[in-house]
Amino acid sequence: MRFDVVTIFPGMLEPVLAASLLGKARERGLIDIQVHDLRRWADPPHRKVDDYAYGGGPGMLMKPEPIVRAVEELRTVDAWTVLLSPQAPPLTQPAVRCLAGREHLILVCGRYEGVDDRVRDLVIDEEVSIGDYVVAGGEVPALVLIEATSRLIPGVVGCEDSVRDESHAAGLLEHPQFTRPEDFRGRRVPPTLLSGDHGRVADWRRAHALRRTLDRRPDLLSERDLTDTQRRQLADFDLDRPEGARPHSCAPASNGDAEALP
Ligand code: J9Q
């Protein structure tokens, strides 16, 4: 799979792409990632890539010419061009799977003030955000997209089991996990996990993945989606140490921002 990234900050991406999982996948020729400086397609001598917005207002927009020239030069017949921007639905694992099915992705990193809107009609196939929060530009979002997509390419993740497990458990959070020592500061590993009984371990993990999901991300699972087995597992939970006893987020419990909207 091939990625071409177009950015005004190429230096932000290279060190991350050279490290870890992605660096190894590139060395092994499983993915080909090229980072391009947008200024290469901007007019000399100043190579300006931004300009004021018609109608006025603060901040600069990305000029259309450099981006359109870049995509027209980089695109192949199989290319799919993605603009990283906050003005799009957030990326989900199904969307990542769809992107991973492409032969060639061209990723255009936007900046917060935005791009001249004509770029969208002319060369953008899809717009992607990574979530509802503000970052300075599309560079970190592009890295997120590349890493999430690359993990689904056969051979990129060393242990294929971990990719399969994650998709198998899709829709549920991971169960709690423990490594040595058995007793850490008086907190013991749940005895079932030490029992050596693979059936009981698997049941424990299923039950606790369910409890953790209902506790932390109830939005992922509505009551009516539960199977009979899951209802039984829930009834069996011991309630001395509810998972929800400690806060897991600094965000308001409900969507506090949304209720302020008209
Ligand atoms: C380009 N905030 O934010 C979340 N996903 C993408 C973005 C983003 C941003 C500014 C510029 C992308």
Image: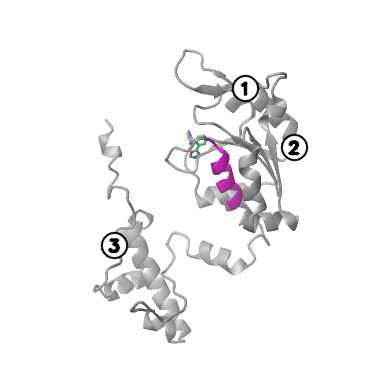
Q: Which mark is on residue 76?
A: 2
**Front-lying residue, 204 or 194:** 194
Q: Answer above or below: position of 44 versus 22.
A: above
Rendered location of residue 125, percent (x, y): 61, 34
Task: Give the alpha-carbon distance from disc 1 to disc 2, as whole Å.
Answer: 20 Å
Which residue position holds label 1? 64
Rendered location of residue 83, percent (x, y): 58, 35
For badge 2, the amino acid type reads: Thr
Using the rendered view, name the quadrant where residue 193 is placed.
bottom left
Query: Which tag, 3 or 2, sits closer to the chain's start?
Result: 2
Q: Is residue 144 visible?
A: yes
Rendered location of residue 139, percent (x, y): 57, 39
Q: Residue at x 39, y 82 (%)?
A: 192
For residue 77, side relative to residue 108 (left or right): right
Query: Which tag, 3 or 1, sits closer to the chain's start?
Result: 1
Using the rendered view, name the quadrant where residue 156 is placed.
bottom right
Q: Is mark 2 within 8 Å of ligand 1?
A: no
Which residue position holds label 3? 246
Rendered location of residue 12, percent (x, y): 61, 41
Contact? badges 3 and 2 (CB < 8 Å)? no
Q: Which residues are magenta?
A: 137-147
| Helix, strand or loop under label 3 | loop
For badge 3, the amino acid type reads: Arg
Task: Give the alpha-carbon distance from disc 3 to disc 1, as whole Å.
Answer: 49 Å
Q: Answer above or below: position of 28 versus 103.
A: below
Q: Answer above or below: position of 138 versus 152.
A: above
Using the rendered view, name the quadrant where residue 127 is placed.
top right
Q: Tag 1: Cα neighbours inside 10 Å, few (<14), some, or many (≥20)?
A: some
Between circles 3 and 1, the one closer to the viewer is 3
